[in-house]
Amino acid sequence: MLPAACRAALFLSLCLAGPTAMAQDCTGKLGTSRVMQVDPSGLQVGTKHFPQTLDLADREVVLTFDDGPLPGTTPSVLKALARECVRATFFVIGRNAAGHPDLLRREIAEGHTVGHHSMTHPMTLADIAYDKAVADIEKGIAADDKAAYGASGTRPRVPFFRFPGFGASSELLDYLKGRGIGVFGADLWASDWNPMTPEEQLTLVMARLDHAGRGIILLHDTRAQTAKMLPAFLTALKEKGYRVVHIVPVPPRTATAP
């Protein structure tokens, strides 16, 4: 049997380079410029809601998608990302993961990171009783891991979480910190919860990105307008010299022999 450290390294490598990613020729594509290993311990990033964000250079972006997976739109998002050799992070809803485990496993197989977004996406967790909010978080994590890997344990495979509607409380943030789960906000978003044409959405998000210059971008793979916009968005990123950074958790720490 492989040592624990080797198993962790093997798991991380499989997450970073699924079969589709390894087989594809990425010459001339936008691509993924680098992989950033992120320590989830005490992590709270995204300047829309926290004082700090990830250590990104100028014109570096992290692409994130919330609320999936959904059969009507997620496959189109995955196709657009694969076409440009881009890896993203999906913060999934537990009931959607349980309902569409094939799509969840496809996200992982294609090299993307899968984080968590609660079981039912209440608006918001901060507005319901603390015990119910914690239960919704934990049920979501368990449902995601069971759908993705066949079983769930005491620690999520990917200890990344995003609050639905960014509705966090200090008590819930402390709870996740105690669980060793990092919290992601965003630095900018496409406002794709508002109806608009793909062209209008592209203009909006690129204007915000050009103003910010870098950051964690929030999109939704459950929105048809976003799925339709994404190919043009990835082209615009390439033409304007933006570089995509893929985030993954640091490998689990293992005990050393005395």
Image: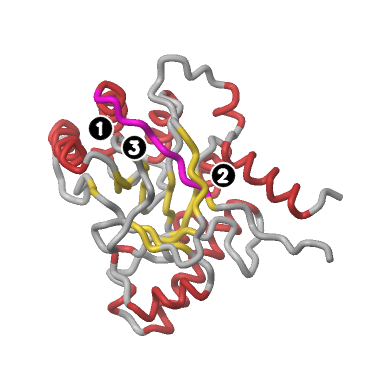
In this view, 68 is above or below 75: below
Q: Which residue is mark 2?
A: 105
Q: Is residue 207 left or right of residue 214?
A: left
- Which x, y percent locates residue 68? 40, 50
Task: Identify the residue position indicated by label 1 in the image.
Answer: 229
Q: Amino acid at mark 3?
A: Glu
Amino acid at the residue labelled 2 = Arg
Residue at 15%, 45% in the rendered image: 195
Instruction: Estimate the x, y position of residue 58 in percent, counting from the top left.
Output: 29, 37
Disc 1 or disc 3, which is closer to the eye? 3
Decide: is 158 above or below 210: below
Q: Residue at x 38, y 58 (%)?
A: 184
Question: What is the magenta range?
Answer: 240-248
Residues under numbered marks 3 and 2 in contact, where contact means CB atoms less than 8 Å apart: no
Work out whether mark 1 precedes mark 3 in sequence or the reverse, and give the earlier one.
3
For mark 3, what is the residue?
A: 60
Q: Is residue 191 left or right of residue 258?
A: left
Distance Cα–Cα, label 1 vs label 3:
20 Å
Q: Main secondary structure of the magenta part?
A: strand
Q: Nearer the viewer, residue 10 or 65?
A: 10
Per the image, label 2 sits on a secondary structure element best described as helix
Describe residue 201's horizontal placement relative to residue 166 as left or right: left
Residue 219 in view in this figure: no
